[in-house]
Image (cartoon, rainbow, N blue to C red):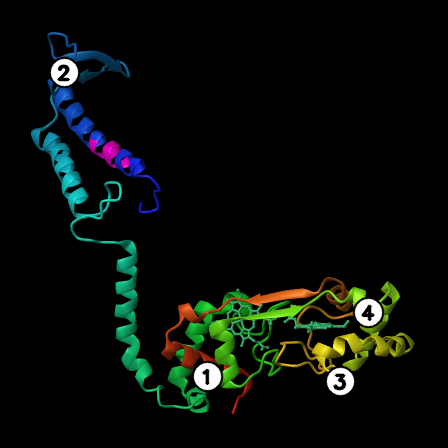
Amino acid sequence: MSDFVSGFWDMYVAGLVIVSIIACLILLVLSGKAKAMTASDNTTGHVWDGDLREMNNPLPRWWSYLFVITVIFGFGYLALYPGLGSYPGLLGWTSRGLHAAEVKAGDEATAPVYARFASMTTEDIAKDPAAMAIGERLYSNNCAQCHASDAQGNKGFPNLTDNDWLHGGTPEKITETITGGRIGNMPPMAAAVGTEEDVKNVAQYVLSLSGSPHDAAKAALGKEKFAVCAACHGADGKGMQAVGSANLTDNIWLHGFGEKAIVDMVNNGMQNVMPPQAKLLTEAQLKVLTAYIWGLSNKS
Ligand code: HEC
Ligand code: HEC
C-alpha cells in the first residue's frame, strides 16, 4: 500500500472497506425487518417437487448473531492488522516482519548444529558425514534446479563432480562462485576469425585439441586462426580460470560437442550466467555447502 503515489487511493480503498462493512450491517437489519408475502398458513407460496413448500420462518437468533459477530470481528481485525488503506494496524504486523522473524528463529535453532564446523577446515568438513548430509540438503534446495540433483549438470550448467573447473575448484574459488555468481562471457568471434570456412577450420582444430574425431587437413588450416582464441583459452587451449574460459582439450563440453556446437559458439558467443546466491545462505551454511561441493570431486 505504501507504493501509492497519491493519498487519494489510500482513502479510496479504506473508504470502500468501511462502507462495505456498514452496508452488510444495514442489509442484515433491513432483511430482518422485511416481511415476505405469506399466505395465512405461513408459507411463501413456493412449491417444489410436487409438495415441498417453503415456509417463512425467521432465522434462528444465534444464526443472526453470527452475522453481527463477524461485523464486530471485522472492525477489530482492521484496528489491529493492516487492511485499511495504508494504515499499518495497532500491532504493527507485516508479512515481511513475520518472515524475517521466522528466518531468525530458524537460524538460531540451527546455529548449535553448525557451531561445530566453524573451526574445521573444508577438508575435514567434507569428511564429516553429518556435515555432508546437511550439505546435500542445502544443495538440493538451492542448486539442484540448475546443476541437476546428482550435481552432474546439464548443457550450459556445469558438472560439479568432474574436477573440471571454469572458475577454479579451490574452496576459496567455490565460495566466491556461490556468493557472487559467475558470468561466463565469450564474445561472438566470427568476424575476428574470418570466413565461414575459416570458422569451420578453427572448429576442427578445437576438436583436434581433445583428440576427438576431426579432419586433420582442416584442423591444420584452423590452427593459425586459433590465435584470436588464445587470448582467452590460452595458446594450448587449456583455458584460463581468471576469465572463466573453458578448457578445450579435455573432451568435456559444456555447450555441446561437435563441429556445429563449436561453430555456434564462435558465431554467436555466449553469456552464461549463474546468479549470486549470497542472500540465500548464512555464513555457516555457505561454509558447509562449499565443503560439500569441494568434496564431490575430491573424494578421499
Ligand atoms: C539459475 C541457475 C543456477 C543456480 C541456482 C546455481 N547455479 Fe551454479 N552455475 C550456473 C551456471 C549457468 C554456471 C556456469 C557459469 C559460467 O558459465 O561461467 C554455474 C557455475 C557454478 C560453479 C562454477 C563451476 C566451475 O566450473 O567453475 C559452481 C561451483 C557452482 N555453479 C555452484 C553452485 C552452487 C553450490 C549453487 C547453489 C547454492 C549453484 N551453483 C546455483 C547456474 C546456476
Ligand atoms: C574474450 C574471451 C574469449 C575468446 C576470445 C574466446 N573465447 Fe571461447 N569461451 C570463453 C569463455 C568465457 C567460455 C566459457 C563460456 C561459459 O562459461 O559458458 C568459452 C567457451 C568456449 C567453448 C565451449 C566449451 C565447452 O565446454 O562447451 C568453445 C568451443 C569455445 N569457447 C571456442 C572458442 C574459439 C574457437 C574461440 C576463437 C575463435 C574462442 N572460444 C574465443 C571466452 C572466450
Secondary structure found at label 2: loop
Residue named by callout 4: 193
Given the current orientation, which residue lies at the most extreme left position? 61
Tell me the kind of residue under disc 3.
Asp
Task: Tell which circle, 4 or 1, labels the residue nearer the N-terminal end.
Answer: 4
Region in magenta: 13-18
Q: Nearer the viewer, mark 1 or mark 3?
A: 3
Task: Tell which circle, 1 or 2, labels the residue nearer the N-terminal end.
Answer: 2
- Residue at mark 1 to residue at mark 2: CA–CA distance: 75 Å
Task: Tell which circle, 2 or 4, labels the residue nearer the N-terminal end.
Answer: 2
- Residue at mark 4 to residue at mark 1: CA–CA distance: 41 Å
Decide whether residue 208 is among the magenta residues.
no
Quarter containing the N terminus: top left
Give the residue drawn at x 14%, y 8%.
39
- Residue at mark 1 to residue at mark 3: CA–CA distance: 31 Å
Q: Nearer the viewer, mark 2 or mark 4?
A: 4
Tell me the kind of residue under disc 1.
Ala
Circle 1 residues within 10 Å: few <14, some 14–19, many ≥20: many
Rendering quarter of residue 211: bottom right
Task: Tell which circle, 2 or 3, labels the residue nearer the N-terminal end.
Answer: 2
Secondary structure found at label 3: loop
Residue named by callout 1: 291
Residue named by callout 2: 34
Does any atom of ligand 2 lie closer than 8 Å to the CB of label 4? yes
